[in-house]
Image (cartoon, grey):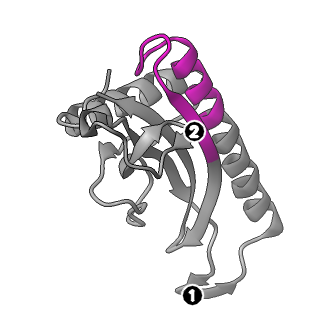
Amino acid sequence: MASVTQLGETAQSILAAFVNQLEVQGVTLPERRYVAPGSLVPWDGEQLVVNLQQIVQGQPGAPYAGTPQPAAATVLSAQWAVSICRPAPVIQSEPLDGLPSAEDSEEAGVEAMTDAAQLVLAAVAIHAAHTLTGPGQGFAIEGCSPLGPEGGLFANRLLFTISLS
C-alpha cells in the first residue's frame, strides 16, 4: 500500500505501472518519462509525466471534511496525475506558412482522443490487477481531461486517487 511517508517511491511505481500497461496496450510512448515536481504538466517537450496533485483526508472518491476522533483515525488519500504530452500542429513562423492543415489538426485530435481512452483503460487494468493498491484498498479514477494546445504541445491528464497508509 502507498504510504504518506514514501510518496516518491509511490510516484515511481505509478510511472512504471502506467508505462508497462500502456505498452501492453500497444501505445507508442514518448521516450521522456519521469516524475515531475509540482502539479502542472511541464510544457517543454513530448513526454509521459506523473505528478502528485494533492493529499486529502478520506477514502478515494469520498473525501471527508470532518475531524476524525481520535486523531489517529485519520484516513488519507493521494491524488495523482498521469499525463501524455505530444506535439501539436502550430503556425509556422519561419517562413510564415499560415495555419496547420485540417488533416494535420485532425490527426493530432484523433491521437489525443486515443491517448485519453488508453490512459483510462490503463488505469482500469492497473486497478483490477492490484498493481498499486491491494484488494479492498481505495482506487478512484477521477477523470481524464485534454490540456492545451500550448507551446506546440497538447496533453491528456488522467487523475486518480489511491489510499495512503
Picture residue at 28% right of the left edge, 27% below the top: 165
Residue type indicated by callout 1: Pro
- Mark 2 or 1: in front is 2
Which residue sits at x=35%, y=45%?
A: 32
Residue located beneath label 2 in the image: 61
Relative vertical location of residue 146 with respect to residue 74 in this rendering, above or below = below
The Cα–Cα distance between marks 2 and 1, rounded to whole angstroms, is 50 Å
Look at mark 1 in the image and give the residue it sits on: 95
Horizontally, is 54 left or right of 142 in the view? left
Residue located 43% across and 16% down the image: 131
* Residue at 32% from the left image edge and 20% from the top image edge: 1
Out of 105 and 133, give the one closest to the viewer.
133
**29, above or below 94, in the image:** above
In depth, the one of 119 and 57 nearer the eye is 57
- Residue extending farthest to the front is 69
Packing grade of label 2 (10 A; few <14, some 14-19, many >=20) is some
Relative placement, left or right, of 146 versus 41 is right
Point out which mark residue 125 bears: none
Residue 24 in view = no
User: Mark 2–mark 1 contact, CB under 8 Å?
Assistant: no
